[in-house]
Image (tube, rainbow, N blue to C red):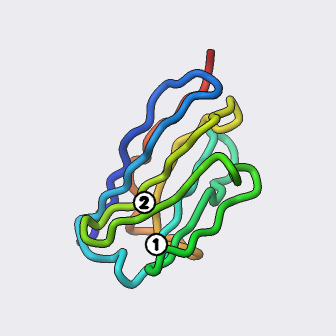
């Protein structure tokens, strides 16, 4: 059974940086487009970034120029480098398949809090 485990979140001041990691227990990355999503309590989950098996990335307009998504298929890991963080980036961040998330793959997520 494939599991996705997100890590790397934390509390950071505005303008700071964090690097999130998403590790999979299986080799799903080799055949799947993977995405990072985020959710604020009480709001709908939104896509942040996606990356295909060849490394082609798509970023949401709200994070373009600040976030970078990358993947290491050998390590079954997807990364999200977040720079110039803003309070509006505060959310729980999840990874999953893209464009259609797989229900069984939702993990616990990792909390990112941007606050002074």
Instruction: Give me the C-alpha separation between circle 1 and circle 2.
Output: 7 Å
Q: Residue at x 60, y 50 (%)?
A: 67
- Disc 2 element: loop
Pinpoint residue 69: horizontal percent, then vertical percent: 52, 59
Residue that lies at the very extreme toward the top in this rendered image? 116
Pinpoint residue 116: horizontal percent, then vertical percent: 62, 15
What residue is disc 2 on? 106
Q: Residues within 10 Å of mark 2 (few under 14, many from 20)?
A: some
Q: Quadrant of residue 45?
A: bottom right
Along the line of sight, which residue is nearer the eye, 13 or 37?
13
Q: Is residue 15 left or right of residue 95?
A: right
Along the line of sight, which residue is nearer the eye, 6 or 84?
84
Pinpoint residue 76: horizontal percent, then vertical percent: 29, 67
Q: Residue at x 50, y 47 (%)?
A: 81
On residue 55, which mark appears?
A: none
Q: Is residue 107 left or right of residue 101?
A: left
Q: Is residue 75 left or right of residue 60?
A: left
Pinpoint residue 29: horizontal percent, then vertical percent: 36, 75
What residue is disc 1 on? 102
């Amino acid at each position: 059974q494939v599991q996705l485990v997100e890590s790397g979140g934390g509390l950071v001041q505005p303008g700071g940086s964090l690097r999130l990691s998403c590790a999979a227990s299986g080799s799903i990355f080799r055949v799947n487009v993977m995405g990072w999503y985020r959710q604020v309590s009480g709001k709908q989950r939104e896509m942040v970034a996606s990356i295909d098996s060849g490394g082609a990335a798509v970023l949401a307009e709200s994070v373009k120029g600040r976030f970078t998504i990358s993947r290491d298929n050998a390590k079954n890991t997807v990364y999200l480098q977040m720079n110039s963080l803003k309070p509006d980036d505060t959310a729980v961040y999840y990874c999953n398949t893209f464009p259609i998330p797989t229900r069984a793959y939702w993990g616990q997520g990792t909390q990112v809090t941007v606050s002074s």
